[in-house]
Image: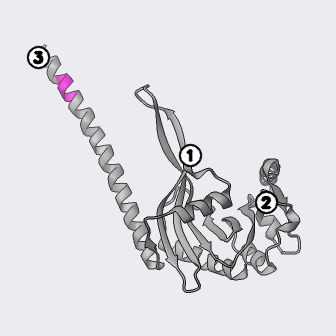
Amino acid sequence: MQSNAIVLIAVICGFFLILLAMVAFVVYTSRKENEQYTRIAQALGFAPIENIDEITQKVAYVRDLNMDKHHRLTNVYCRTHASGAKTYLYNLSFRSRSRSASGFGKKTTYHPLESNVLAFISPVWNLPRFNAFPRLSGSGTMAKLGNSIVEKAMDIKHEVIRFPHIPKLDEQYLISTLDIPPSNVRPSDGFLRALAIHPQLNLHAGGNTLTISFTGDVTESPSEEKMKQLYRIGMELAREL
């Protein structure tokens, strides 16, 4: 009996040690990532902010999201320019609810939806709401089929817009609008050409806001080199609006 009690105590202690190790690992990873974001933000001239209401409202509008109930922004930093324009750096995640491991109640988990995002906000813009997402590359059957399926799915809620006069743009990007006729979405040719030469961007625009990120960065940690590259691209696009 005593031997069984010792084994049981050892198992319980082992379980709690594993649990503590997991918690410690999550805390350590989160702290390292936060430090990395802070370092990159400082390198780009950004500073952390406490009030994120403005950027939350802008993201909700351009992406047509219900931010209060299902989404949240994290690692939010801001840079204010002399012109009155602002640039934000942030991550966007969405909430899911599933039954907890214990079987009692449900647990809330946040998953990345868009990571390492830059939002450019200018008081002089009044943009129609539109977005751009990269098409699958390649000329093979699977790529064509995949692009066709995505386009048909997009047509359920959005209107696809084509710009045949801009070389490679329609082959590289699926551009659509949510709530206005496609004929009303006519960014400058300079903006469209700049977009065409920078593939693999996830772009949303509307009102006084433009957001961009690299599509392959959803689950990746931020890279200073890539964020500087994204910032240069964003400034190039913003100048053409």
SS of the residue under disc 3: helix
> Magenta region: which residues?
7-11
Tell me where residue 203 appears, x and y as whole percent: 68, 65
* Label 1 to label 3: alpha-carbon separation: 52 Å
Q: Which percent across, then down, holds residue 93?
A: 54, 52
Amino acid type for the residue under numbered disc 3: Gln
Mark 2 = which residue?
Answer: 177
Which residue was labeled with disc 1?
Answer: 69
Indicate the position of residue 114 as horizontal and vertical percent values.
58, 58
The quadrant of the rendering that contains the C terminus is bottom right
Report if residue 193 lies within the magenta region.
Answer: no
Up/down of 5 relative to 144, above or below: above
Q: Nearer the viewer, residue 214 or 156?
A: 156
Q: Tell me if residue 134 comes above or below residue 3 in the rendering.
A: below
Q: Left of 27 or right of it: where is 119?
A: right
Q: State left or right for residue 122 relative to residue 163.
A: left
Which residue corresponds to the image point at 75% horizontal and 77% vertical from the top-left?
191
Regarding mark 2 in the picture, which secondary structure is present there? strand
Type of amino acid under label 1? Lys
Question: Circle 3 is placed at which residue position?
Answer: 2
- Amino acid type assigned to the residue bearing label 2 in the image: Thr
Marks 3 and 2, Cα distance to the nearest angstrom? 71 Å
Eyeballing the image, is 223 above or below 24? below
Q: Secondary structure at mark 1?
A: helix
The front one of 134 and 93 is: 93
Question: Looking at the image, which is closer to me, 34 or 15?
Answer: 34
Q: Position of residue 118 (x, y in %)?
A: 57, 69
